[in-house]
Image: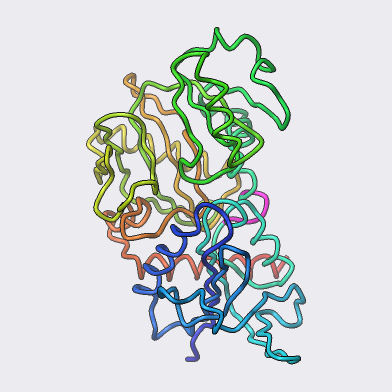
Amino acid sequence: MSKLKVGIVFGGVFEEHPVSVKSAQEVAKHLDADRYETYWIGITKSGDWRLCDGPEASWEDDAHRPVVLSPDRSVHGLLVLGEGTYETIRLDVVLPVLHGKLGEDGAIQGLLELSGIPYVGCDVQSSALCMDKALAYTVVADAGIPTPTFWTLFPGDAVQTIGDPGVLPYPVFVKPARSGSSFGVSKVTSAAELADAVATARQYDDKVLIEEGVEAEEIGCAILGNGGELVTGEVDHVALSHGFFKIHQEDAPETGSENATFVVPADVPAEARELVKTEAKRVYRALGCRGLARVDMFLKTDGTVVLNEVNTLPGLTSYSRYPRMMAAAGISMTDFLDRAVDLALQTATSEGAR
């Protein structure tokens, strides 16, 4: 049987570029070489696309060939650019290993839709919806799933747009509405700190969310699947020693977080873990997710859960939560990648039949 030609896109121009590279390096270790013929497409920090041998340290060198993903469905793949010439490479499927802006916000997904190439993960609509925390909260709340109370500052809005800052239920969290990880997030304990926190968030997005602090434990649920056929990993617990969870911002995250320990399976009652899984699936379906996502939730002392956020292309690094949760449920990284690719191909077949 011939190998599947899979294009793996990684890197990117925004703040999660280094995380994406680490995720791609982990994928490279676990992708089944007997099943796939891989084409590595690295996007440099300046936005250049390079066809490279893999996500090794030197992949951003100019020696690598420029490449673009053709939106022409007759090409169905890559255009490798030369001196006045080009070569085409037809792809069977694309695995985007991109996080944050232009990675999990629907941008790369839109390009792949134009190209006609099956791709792993959520579609344009659900990617964009999950990336915008304010919109995600609105949709999920309409489906009857609890969310934090929140206020939205749109571009150009002053803090006073939401009313008197002095009456907010401090502490609150101020965060970019459309950014990955915890970049630009601040915990604010008084009105005097609010303007600076908004300015920090606006370094990453001009739409800002102000969100009530929820007294609860941070719990995550890894989900894999389409429609009614959903598989979950073991639920995890982010046990904090102090402060709040800032993923990917430590100097050496591979050696552990400075203030968090990840407990998998979560050290909470079995019924609470099952509730988290049930509610996470409801969130996943309400937002139209497919392929995979990590749904982060708050588990309150009264046993109820509240949505935190949804990551449609969660980190796949050696220290990331999603692969840990799947591994704890008996799904190895290699198995997960195979299943994710199969789901993408099944989706393409189903949509082609309509």
Using the image as rendered, state which of residue 41 and residue 96 is in the foreground.
41
Tell me what residue is drawn at x 59 percent, y 67 percent: 119
Using the image as rendered, state which of residue 335 and residue 6 is in the foreground.
6
Residue 292 belongs to the span the image colors magenta: no
Q: Give the range drawn in magenta.
A: 122-126
Label tally? 0
Using the image as rendered, state which of residue 297 and residue 169 is in the foreground.
169
Tell me what residue is drawn at x 48 percent, y 76 percent: 59
Q: In which quarter of the image is the C terminus?
A: bottom right
Tell me what residue is drawn at x 60 percent, y 65 percent: 347
The quarter holding residue 41 reads: bottom right
Q: Where is residue 95 in the image (x, y as percent from the top left)?
A: 53, 68
Q: In the shown orientation, is residue 105 left or right of residue 244?
A: right
Q: Position of residue 272 (x, y in %)?
A: 31, 32
Q: Position of residue 340 (x, y in %)?
A: 47, 65
The quarter holding residue 58 reads: bottom left
> Eyeballing the image, is 292 above or below 211?
below
Q: Main structural element of the magenta stretch: helix, strand or loop?
A: helix
* Structure colour scheme: rainbow
> Eyeballing the image, is 275 above or below 29?
above
> Eyeballing the image, is 119 above or below 275?
below
Tell me what residue is drawn at x 35 percent, y 57 percent: 323
Q: Position of residue 314 (x, y in %)?
A: 46, 53
The quarter holding residue 242 reads: top left
